[in-house]
């Protein structure tokens, strides 16, 4: 079975600073990987996903993530954070092929200081 | 696009009553939908997989008699929390997958408070 670890419960950055949210996964083969964002009281919005191919994935809202097989990681990055990026971020992994129902990490809460 | 609508967005009910939550795929047909539960400051836990025209598949530890799921059409799945208790208070989110291109789309969630 697959699993996801997001080691940081909270991350605080200043507006305009760069951001990296960590995600490590456990899966026996090449997984499908996702990052979702959740604003308070809202559902989840897909930021980006990795299925195969280029290991650097571009997403919406200026986010990108890099799949590193050797480190079993899929860290999310943004070069310059905006106050509106404050939210909960979830990394998820799905078994490649089939329905790949995502398994979620516990989430990282992003706090942005002005 | 691939839009999933969830209703209601919040509901307060008394202990012992039942509450129904609807999940609709607005611009695509979904033979399978998924129901998640999210506790405060925690991740999403898959509760069950809703299958159109057949019984839902429940994850281990989820009471199927407590959380009734019906997937009567290709665009609608419902989750009914029966005989609700305060410990059932939570944020419930549904999801559906249009196809491999879109991946999984999530509803906006339902905040259930049982008093």
Image: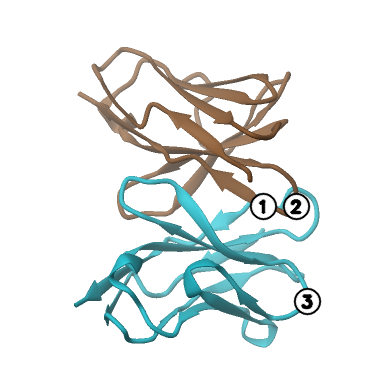
Chain colours: A cyan, B brown
Q: Position of residue A9 (x, y in %)?
A: 34, 69
The count of marks equals 3
Residue A74 visible in the displayed image: no
Q: Which residue is nearer to you in this view: B62 or B51?
A: B51
Q: Quadrant of the C terminus of chain A?
A: bottom left
Residue A77 % position (x, y): 48, 80
Marks 1 and 3: same chain? Answer: no
> Circle 2 marks a residue in which chain?
B
Q: Chain of mark 1?
A: B
**Pointers 1 and 2 in contact (C-beta within 8 Å):** yes
Q: Secondary structure at mark 3?
A: loop
Task: Please identify the quadrant where the N terminus of chain A is shown.
Answer: bottom right
Q: Chain of mark 3?
A: A
The residue at the point 43 percent across, 41 percent down is: B108
Q: Position of residue B98 (x, y in %)?
A: 70, 42
Q: Which label belongs to residue A58?
A: none
Q: Is disc 1 surrounded by few (<14), some (14 to 19) or many (20+) residues within 10 Å?
A: some
Residue underneath mark 2: B100
Residue beneath label 3, please? A53
Q: Are marks 2 and 3 on the same chain?
A: no
Q: Mark 1 highlights which residue?
A: B103
């Amino acid at each position: 079975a697959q699993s996801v670890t997001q080691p940081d419960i909270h991350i605080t950055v200043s507006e305009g600073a760069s951001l990296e949210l960590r995600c490590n996964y456990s899966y026996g083969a090449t997984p499908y990987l996702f990052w979702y964002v959740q604003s308070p009281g809202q559902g989840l919005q897909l930021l980006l996903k990795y299925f195969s191919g280029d290991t650097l994935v571009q997403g919406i809202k200026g986010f990108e993530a890099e799949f590193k097989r050797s480190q079993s990681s899929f860290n999310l990055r943004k070069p310059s954070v905006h106050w509106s990026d404050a939210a909960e971020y979830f990394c998820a992994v799905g078994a490649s092929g089939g329905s790949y129902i995502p398994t979620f990490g516990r989430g990282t809460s992003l706090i942005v200081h002005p | 696009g691939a839009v999933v609508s969830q209703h209601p967005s919040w509901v307060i009910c008394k202990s012992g009553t039942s509450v129904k939550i609807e999940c609709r795929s607005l611009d695509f047909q979904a033979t399978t939908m998924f129901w998640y539960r999210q506790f405060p400051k925690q991740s999403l836990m898959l509760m069950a997989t809703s299958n159109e025209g057949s019984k839902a598949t429940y994850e281990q530890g989820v009471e199927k008699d407590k959380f009734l799921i019906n997937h009567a059409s290709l665009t609608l799945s419902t989750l009914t929390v029966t005989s609700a208790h305060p410990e059932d208070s939570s944020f419930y989110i549904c999801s559906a997958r249009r196809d491999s291109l879109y991946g999984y789309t999530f509803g906006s969630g339902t905040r259930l408070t049982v008093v």
